[in-house]
Image (cartoon, rainbow, N blue to C red):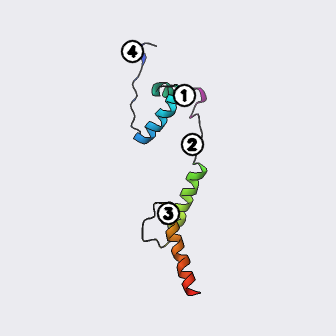
Amino acid sequence: MTTSSKKKVQIQVNRELSEAAEAIFQELGLSTTTAITACYKRVVAEGGLPFELKLSSQEMAVLQFKNAEKGLPVTDKIETKEQLDKWLSEGDEEDDETK
Protein backbone atom coordinates (compact mmCIF):
# COMPACT_ATOMS: atom_id res chain seq x y z
CA MET A 1 0.00 0.00 0.00
CA THR A 2 1.55 3.27 -1.03
CA THR A 3 1.44 6.39 1.08
CA SER A 4 -0.81 8.14 -1.43
CA SER A 5 -3.45 5.38 -1.06
CA LYS A 6 -3.78 5.93 2.67
CA LYS A 7 -6.28 8.18 4.38
CA LYS A 8 -5.53 9.98 7.63
CA VAL A 9 -8.27 9.50 10.25
CA GLN A 10 -8.38 11.81 13.25
CA ILE A 11 -10.63 11.32 16.25
CA GLN A 12 -10.95 12.77 19.71
CA VAL A 13 -11.13 10.25 22.54
CA ASN A 14 -11.18 10.68 26.29
CA ARG A 15 -7.54 10.83 27.41
CA GLU A 16 -7.90 8.20 30.16
CA LEU A 17 -9.68 5.81 27.80
CA SER A 18 -7.02 6.33 25.15
CA GLU A 19 -4.17 5.71 27.58
CA ALA A 20 -5.83 2.57 28.98
CA ALA A 21 -6.39 1.16 25.48
CA GLU A 22 -2.85 2.05 24.37
CA ALA A 23 -1.41 0.22 27.40
CA ILE A 24 -3.31 -2.91 26.33
CA PHE A 25 -2.19 -2.49 22.71
CA GLN A 26 1.41 -2.24 23.92
CA GLU A 27 1.07 -5.44 25.98
CA LEU A 28 -0.29 -7.15 22.87
CA GLY A 29 2.62 -5.84 20.81
CA LEU A 30 0.38 -3.62 18.69
CA SER A 31 0.57 0.01 17.74
CA THR A 32 -2.59 2.08 17.95
CA THR A 33 -2.61 2.27 14.14
CA THR A 34 -2.42 -1.52 13.85
CA ALA A 35 -5.22 -2.00 16.39
CA ILE A 36 -7.51 0.47 14.65
CA THR A 37 -6.71 -1.03 11.25
CA ALA A 38 -7.60 -4.49 12.62
CA CYS A 39 -10.91 -3.09 13.89
CA TYR A 40 -11.66 -1.56 10.47
CA LYS A 41 -10.86 -4.88 8.77
CA ARG A 42 -13.27 -6.75 11.08
CA VAL A 43 -16.01 -4.17 10.39
CA VAL A 44 -15.60 -4.72 6.65
CA ALA A 45 -15.40 -8.52 6.97
CA GLU A 46 -18.49 -8.77 9.18
CA GLY A 47 -20.48 -5.97 7.59
CA GLY A 48 -20.87 -4.23 10.95
CA LEU A 49 -19.25 -3.79 14.30
CA PRO A 50 -17.29 -6.87 15.42
CA PHE A 51 -18.87 -6.75 18.86
CA GLU A 52 -22.31 -6.31 20.35
CA LEU A 53 -23.21 -2.85 21.60
CA LYS A 54 -24.99 -3.29 24.90
CA LEU A 55 -24.65 -2.30 28.52
CA SER A 56 -22.59 -4.53 30.79
CA SER A 57 -24.33 -5.94 33.85
CA GLN A 58 -22.52 -3.34 35.99
CA GLU A 59 -23.59 -0.47 33.71
CA MET A 60 -27.16 -1.79 33.76
CA ALA A 61 -27.15 -1.91 37.58
CA VAL A 62 -25.91 1.70 37.76
CA LEU A 63 -28.63 2.79 35.33
CA GLN A 64 -31.31 0.99 37.36
CA PHE A 65 -30.00 2.60 40.56
CA LYS A 66 -30.05 6.06 38.99
CA ASN A 67 -33.63 5.53 37.82
CA ALA A 68 -34.66 4.27 41.27
CA GLU A 69 -33.07 7.19 43.10
CA LYS A 70 -35.06 9.77 41.10
CA GLY A 71 -38.00 9.42 43.50
CA LEU A 72 -35.92 9.48 46.68
CA PRO A 73 -35.74 12.63 48.83
CA VAL A 74 -31.97 13.07 48.60
CA THR A 75 -30.81 16.62 49.16
CA ASP A 76 -27.05 15.95 49.11
CA LYS A 77 -25.25 14.63 46.07
CA ILE A 78 -24.08 11.06 46.68
CA GLU A 79 -20.95 10.23 44.70
CA THR A 80 -19.25 7.41 46.61
CA LYS A 81 -20.23 4.11 48.17
CA GLU A 82 -19.28 5.50 51.58
CA GLN A 83 -21.62 8.47 51.14
CA LEU A 84 -24.40 6.11 50.08
CA ASP A 85 -23.81 3.82 53.08
CA LYS A 86 -23.88 6.83 55.42
CA TRP A 87 -27.10 8.14 53.84
CA LEU A 88 -28.75 4.73 54.04
CA SER A 89 -27.72 4.23 57.67
CA GLU A 90 -29.18 7.62 58.69
CA GLY A 91 -32.67 6.15 58.32
CA ASP A 92 -31.69 3.24 60.59
CA GLU A 93 -30.68 5.63 63.38
CA GLU A 94 -34.06 7.38 63.23
CA ASP A 95 -35.83 4.00 63.38
CA ASP A 96 -33.82 3.04 66.49
CA GLU A 97 -34.88 6.27 68.23
CA THR A 98 -38.60 5.68 67.60
CA LYS A 99 -38.55 2.12 69.02
Q: CA distance from mark 4 to mark 3?
A: 56 Å
Whole-percent x, y for residue 48 in the image:
57, 33
Whole-percent x, y for residue 57 in the image:
61, 51
Magenta residues (range)? 45-54
- The residue beneath circle 1 is 28
Whole-percent x, y for residue 96 in the image:
57, 82
Badge 3 amino acid: Glu
Badge 4 amino acid: Ser
- At horizontal 55% and vertical 27% (from top left) the residue drawn is 44
Of the two numbered discs 4 and 3 on the same chain, state the one appearing first in sequence: 4
Disc 4 on helix, strand or loop? helix
- The residue beneath circle 4 is 4
Q: Residue extending furthest bottom?
A: 99
Q: CA distance from mark 3 to mark 2?
A: 31 Å
Circle nearer the viewer, 4 or 1? 1
Q: Quadrant of residue 42?
A: top right
Mark 2 is surrounded, within 10 Å at the Cα level, by few (under 14), some (14 to 19) or many (20 or more) other residues, namely few
Circle nearer the viewer, 1 or 3? 3
Q: Are marks 1 and 2 in contact (CB under 8 Å)?
A: no
Q: CA distance from mark 1 to mark 2?
A: 23 Å
Of the two numbered discs 3 and 2 on the same chain, state the one appearing first in sequence: 2
Of the two numbered discs 1 and 3 on the same chain, state the one appearing first in sequence: 1
Residue 12 position (above or below residue 28): below
Mark 4 is surrounded, within 10 Å at the Cα level, by few (under 14), some (14 to 19) or many (20 or more) other residues, namely few
- The residue beneath circle 3 is 82
| Residue 99 marker | none
Q: CA distance from mark 2 to mark 4?
A: 34 Å
Badge 2 amino acid: Leu
Badge 1 amino acid: Leu
